[in-house]
Amino acid sequence: MFQLFDQTSHPGAGPARLAALRAALAAEGVAGFLVPRADAHQGEYVAARDERLQWLTGFTGSAGFCIVLPDVAGVFIDGRYRVQVKAQVDQGAFTPVHWPEEKPGPWIAAHLSAGVVGFDPWLHSAEEISKLEAALEETGVTLRPVTNFIDPIWPDQPEAPNGRAFAHPDALAGEASADKRARLAKGLRGAGHGAAVLTLPDSICWLLNIRGGDVPRNPVVHAFAILHDDARVTLFASGSKFDAATRAHLGAQVTLRPPSAFVPALRTLQGPVQIDRATAPLAVSQELSEAGVTVAWGDDPCRLPKACKTLAELDGMREAHLRDGAAVVEFLAWLDAQPPGSLTEIDVVTALEGYRRATNALYDISFDTICGAGPNGAIMHYRVTHQTNRTVEDNQLLLVDSGAQYRDGTTDITRTIAIGNPGDEARVCYTRVLAGMIAISRVRFPKGVAGRDLDPLARYCLWTAGQDFDHGTGHGVGAFLSVHEGPQRISRLSEVPLEPGMILSNEPGYYREGAFGIRLENLIVVQVAPPLGDNRAQFSFETLTFVPLDRRLIVKGMLAAGDIDWLNAYHAHVLEKIGARVSAPALGWLVSACAPL
């Protein structure tokens, strides 16, 4: 099994660890300390060594941070984790704070009249610290870069990861690394920049057409890189990760150096040097400035090209989704045949991974499967453990959010399934969520529209009932890279215009704490829309995911005629594309599941 079910959150250890941290701060005359869920590479996913927030507080979510002050320690979490955090932290020691509704600057000022709050400049971006400094400007509180206070008091902190790097074939990437580097270097020269510093692991892997094993579920290499304006790249990573074949794949224009050489190399650069204010650790720009090197703030040059997939990447993603769709259909057919009450959440997760393994193409799962029965479905990023494992009982909803990493693509799919008769209220809520998913699937939109412009379409039916969901409608997805990828997303916060080739999730939901959770998710790709009307430039979405939606949970009378037409056409395509790929028993189930409404 890729997925394990051990409990990694230990709330009981939090108070003692918090006391040790406060003692270390007091010894240095520091009033507070910022503890982010971040590493020096500023990616969303971190290795075990960098799980400082989890070690201190017990909170295991993929986003959030803790601000430790003398009399209060706030754990800042967004809407996805407000149920989860209450179960994972000792609320006698840590205070959950609803973020971004409550901003860290005013919160600090309300709990600390004066003093120094320290932060590790390798674990925070320049943009993040700049905003916090501005918020504290009129207070008696100052921010100060300091050495990390967690690492010295973490006695069994894991070693840094040292996963094997390997080549990602040009045939799957659709563009040779040399061509990518030349294209981006031309952009640097056009901007008058001598180099760009890259810190995001998926950006570096995309640029060099490599993959690795340093972060769970995400095939990336922990590294820093400098892209020079002549298309050379200096790569800073442990040499033990690269065998002879991978070094040869990198080519003569890529120089591999140890991580310890990164900071000295920064100090020798000839500026201006381009750095992403939002994603690079503050320490990078500090080192450059101290050496007299001009810093030019600009976007990570890899992020937008990486987001707009090549034709080869799109072909790979399509094939990966058909393979994965067949595995999920086999799983759903098996699940429907099991008597209610005979399975646990762990049984479900294990079976689903087994069907994906049976493809003989599974590299890894793309994240730990979220499988929530009944009230556990309301925990948006629930991860089942031996301690929380719940029986899948009759007359309830089962939410299963899962994905796979294949060499030709990354998948992410959520289905909410009826176990017996979950009741009319569940069906009504399910149909509202489905209507939002269909609205995103059907939309045409002008060039220049961003994710924030489309996000309300997924919520309209819920809003009319006074309901909503506390997460974005969709995130970007990489091609055999991170299952969460920027800068594209469908969210009220996203201002990045959507462009052809961008892959996103389409996943509205609804969650009722203590009762049930509903989420439906397909992956979609931005495409040029066929000519229509006065032939304005418009885009639409191609659906990549082909797995039936549970017809038993749909209240047909709540859907518009166009929505029903879309759903019937979608199910016809599912049957056409997946039917030949599944076993005879699964095909029988699929025919029934795809019958027109």
Image (cartoon, rainbow, N blue to C red):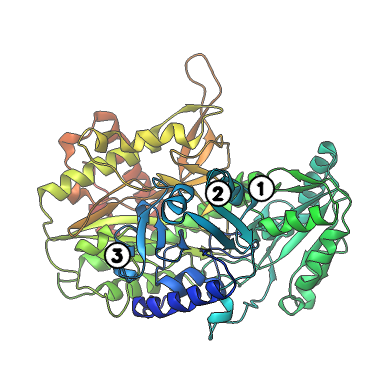
Cα separation between marks 1 and 2: 14 Å
Give the residue at mark 2: 132
Among the two numbered marks 1 and 2 on one chain, the one whose residue lies closer to the N terminus: 2
Front residue (pair 86, 33):
33
Q: Report helix, strand or loop for mark 2.
A: helix
Cα separation between marks 3 and 2: 26 Å
Q: Which mark is residue 277?
A: 1
User: Which x, y percent locates residue 274?
Assistant: 76, 47
Among the two numbered marks 1 and 3 on one chain, the one whose residue lies closer to the N terminus: 3
Front residue (pair 493, 408):
493
Give the residue at mark 3: 86
Cα separation between marks 1 and 3: 33 Å
Q: Quadrant of the C terminus?
A: top left
Work out which residue is located at the far bottom of the displayed protein and give it: 156
Among the two numbered marks 3 and 2 on one chain, the one whose residue lies closer to the N terminus: 3
Residue 395: tell me if it is visible.
yes
Decide: few, some or many residues near mark 2? Use Cα within 10 Å; few <14, some 14-19, many ≥20. some
User: Which x, y percent locates residue 293?
Assistant: 84, 51
